[in-house]
Image: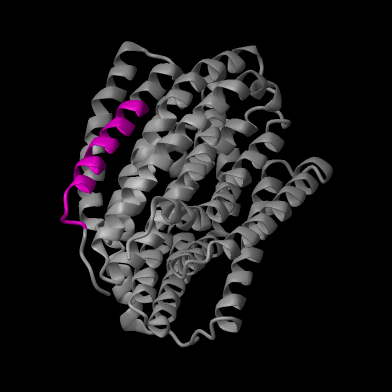
Amino acid sequence: MPLTPRARDRQILRLAVPAFGALIAEPLFLLTDTVIVSHLPAPALGALGVASTVLSALVGLCVFLAYGTTAAVARQIGAGDARRAVRQGMDGLWLAAGVGLAVIVVVWPLAPYLVQLVGAEGELARQAVTYLRISLLGVPSMLLVLAGTGVLRGMQDTVTPLLVSVGAFVVNAVLNVAFVLWLGWGIAGSAWGTVMAQTLAAGVYLTMMFARHRAPFRPDLTGIRAAGSAGVALVVRTACLQAVLIIATAVATRMGNQQIEAHTIVSRIWTLLAFALDAIAIAGQAITGHALGAGDAAGARAATRRMVVWGVGSGVVLGLLVVVTGPFLPALFDADATVAGELSATLWVVALLQPIAGVVFVLDGVLIGAGDQVYLAWAGVWTTLAFLPAVLLVVTLGGGLVMLWVALGVWMAARMVTLGLRANGGKWLVIGA
């Protein structure tokens, strides 16, 4: 029997509300770091922005560990095979550990070159390298958290990731205050606090998998390879997203110190809003995977329509929230007059983009849950190509930070078009485990 709209809303909210809390914990990590580091002498805040851009790109490329695992586990749960769901979850965790160690080995010697690629020089580059190298030690834990979160979401459990994320956020905030402000470790203290918090969260997920779900410890090489192969298309999709964000940061860096500081703050706020909207997308991944695994294509489409409505409404609310809180944000980040002016003007663009972002994130989650990764990879390529002329125009005309974020708006609009066209079709509605 098809669900009524009210029952559908309850299903979405049961997953989305806890997911919202868990999702905003990660950008709150960064936002907390930004607030604390903003009290250090320049160029600490700019260095945090540069290093975080590189780190976010590296970890972001591995988001398939959460998304791919959620879709795979949800399909198995929908098909009634809980044992296979747990096995696929463990494959994702082993893959996360291996990829995390590889990232440390490869990126550590490349750290100076990566921050220079973003446009950092001199003392800005030195501090960025310090933050990046310390943060690399926490990458395996970050990826284990991604995979562990994906497993539980696929099992329709978004409450446990919420509890873990809140705990990690509190630990991160306390350690950052202690290391940066009390002990005077500077930007290195901020990195160490986040590493320790992420490591604690990873330990909780591993303990839970073995204790609650009795997951087998022994790695299944065939399953790990399959999980890696399934994630290739999502890596391409994510690489395109990260390329756009890195290019934007590089352009802002070359505008000047005040502009990169303002861009760093705006990016943190954008990320926080994006993760908030992504709560419905997480519900979309779990609901779509479960419905298609159970052979209910009509239910998957009905849920998608309803979640798009929720996405638009949430985007409008968040946009209004940005407008209302915008005048108070410069003081929160101890911004000088120039940075405050750049920040206030750019936040208007961010506010206007929120309804579009609501649609984009929901449809992205739905198609990930459906396992439509190949299309998402191609869509990522085309939308990146749509962004490049817009950002080139900003550089050529000497546009400021506001115009840079307008160019990012062009990119978001292109994503909405490509994802909307796909969702309106039927090729993504593939049923079965």
**Residue visible at 67% across and 59% down in the picture:** 196
**Residue at far right of view:** 182
Look at the picture and state if 149 lies above or below 222. above
Residue 353 seen in render: yes
Residue 359 image-quadrant placement? top left
Q: Main secondary structure of the magenta part?
A: helix
Residue 201: x %, y % from top left: 63, 64
Look at the picture and state if 291 lies above or below 176. below
**Residue visible at 34% across and 24% down in the picture:** 407
Q: Quadrant of the C terminus?
A: bottom left
Q: Quadrant of the N terminus?
A: bottom left
Residue 91 or residue 350, whichever sits in front? 350
Residue 143: x %, y % from top left: 49, 62
Residue 79 or residue 52, whichever sits in front? 79
Residue 411 or residue 44, whichever sits in front? 411
Q: Is residue 57 left or right of residue 421?
A: right
**Residue visible at 77% across and 44% down in the picture:** 177
Residue 261: x %, y % from top left: 57, 26
**Residue visible at 31% across and 63% down in the picture:** 231
Residue 389 image-quadrant placement? top left
Residue 228 belongs to the span the image colors magenta: no
Look at the picture and state if 185 lies above or below 3. above
Q: Is residue 39 left or right of residue 223?
A: right
Residue 422 belongs to the span the image colors magenta: yes
Magenta stretch bounds: 408-428
Q: Is residue 416 left or right of residue 217?
A: left
Residue 17: x %, y % from top left: 55, 52
Residue 234 seen in render: no
